[in-house]
Amino acid sequence: MQTIPPRIGSLQLDNPIILAPMAGVTSLPYRRIMKSFGASLVFTEMVSANGLIRDGRKTRELLISCREEAPLGIQLFGDDPRVLAEATRMISDECRLLDINMGCPVKKVIRSGAGSALLKDPGRIEKIVTAVRSAYPGPLTVKIRSGWDADSRNFLQIGQIVEAAGADAITLHPRTRSQAFSGKADWSEIGELKSKLRIPVFGSGDIFTAEDGIQMLQQTGCDALMIGRGGYGNPWLIRDILTLLDDGTPTPVSIAEKHQVALKHLQLHRKQFGDRKTLFEMRKHLSWYARGLTGASRFRAALQRVSNIDRLIEQVDLFFHEAENE
């Protein structure tokens, strides 16, 4: 299947596979792994505009980058057009592309009026995109959901507002805020949005296999795929989609390869954040790498009991060696 890699404003992507911004997941080590498997664009975790304005150290840590992951996208969230514009000016030299989150369904974000809460206020969305556009000359995108709930699926209206206000592309996760991640993403809405807009439309939601990715491209005509939960512990998803796009046949992933990549991820995380943070934050990633293998549930339980980094590495080696010899 031949596709033309999308252009987002002044940014030409190498292929149509984008790594989604995900809170608590897309730190620099994770992004480096996914980039190494072929993602053309990777995103930071979503960054609070208010946190940047207040010069929060933890907020600033989310922006740590390296040359290997370029081009880097930064995703901001907030509800105040002026604050978002000021935060944009603060980081404009640190990113190659800026995205505004208007789809996060998490209650803490919703209570602040940001994320998918904005879908209830199209007028505010227009003000936000207009303000950020005036503050940032580079590629600007917006990520949305279908709407707040089943009775207000206003993604077409929001898409047209975003385009008119100057965004260069839009990503649609075709679930409502009320659905969160339940039910099934309605890919037909991605195709519907694509048919109404001139700017590129990216599809997100329920891409768990390489075949899912190809089907979304074929069914919706979207310009690129945004990989989210399907990539947890599975960077091979990106590689395999690219292989199918090149009319090739994906090769099965060996347990030894999973072991190797899991350890590389762990070491990148350790180098970036130190032993203590790695001990706690890598538990979820290692559990994802182990999914589907014999003894995975015991491995997950063992990870919760580990109290030092060397023991953590021992557990990883032990688990994958035993799984390989099953």
Image (tube, rainbow, N blue to C red):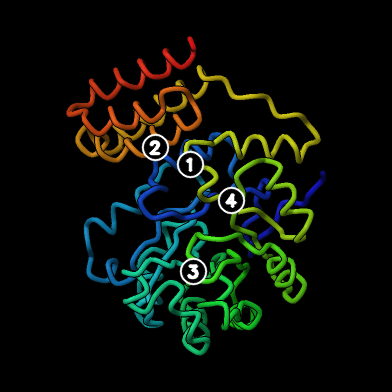
The N terminus, quarter of image: top right
- Amino acid type at mark 1: Tyr
Which residue is at 36% across, 32% downward?
268
Q: Residue 83 at what x, y percent from top left?
A: 34, 78
Label 3 belongs to which residue? 103
Name the residue type under label 4: Ile
Q: Which residue is mark 4?
A: 18
Spatial separation of the CA atoms under disc 3 and disc 1: 20 Å
Using a 10 Å C-alpha cutoff, classify the residue at mark 4 as few (fewer than 14 neighbours), some (14 to 19) or many (20 or more): many
Image disc number at residue 285: 2
Q: Which residue is mark 1?
A: 232
Residue visible at 61% across and 68% down? 170
Who is closer to the viewer here, 290 or 83? 290
Q: Earlier in the sequence, mark 4 or mark 2?
A: 4
In this rendered view, identify the residue nearer to me: 294 or 115: 294
Q: Callout 2, which amino acid?
A: His
Disc 2, disc 3: CB below 8 Å? no
Find residue 305 and report its horizontal and vertical position in percent: 21, 30
User: Counting other residues with Cα less than 10 Å from the Cα at mark 2, is it few (<14), some (14-19), or many (20 or more)?
Assistant: some
- The local secondary structure at tag 1 comes to loop
Q: Position of residue 127 (x, y in %)?
A: 48, 86
Mark positioned earlier in the residue sequence (2 or 3): 3
The Cα–Cα distance between marks 1 and 4, rounded to whole angstroms, is 14 Å
Q: Which tag, 1 or 4, sits closer to the chain's start? A: 4
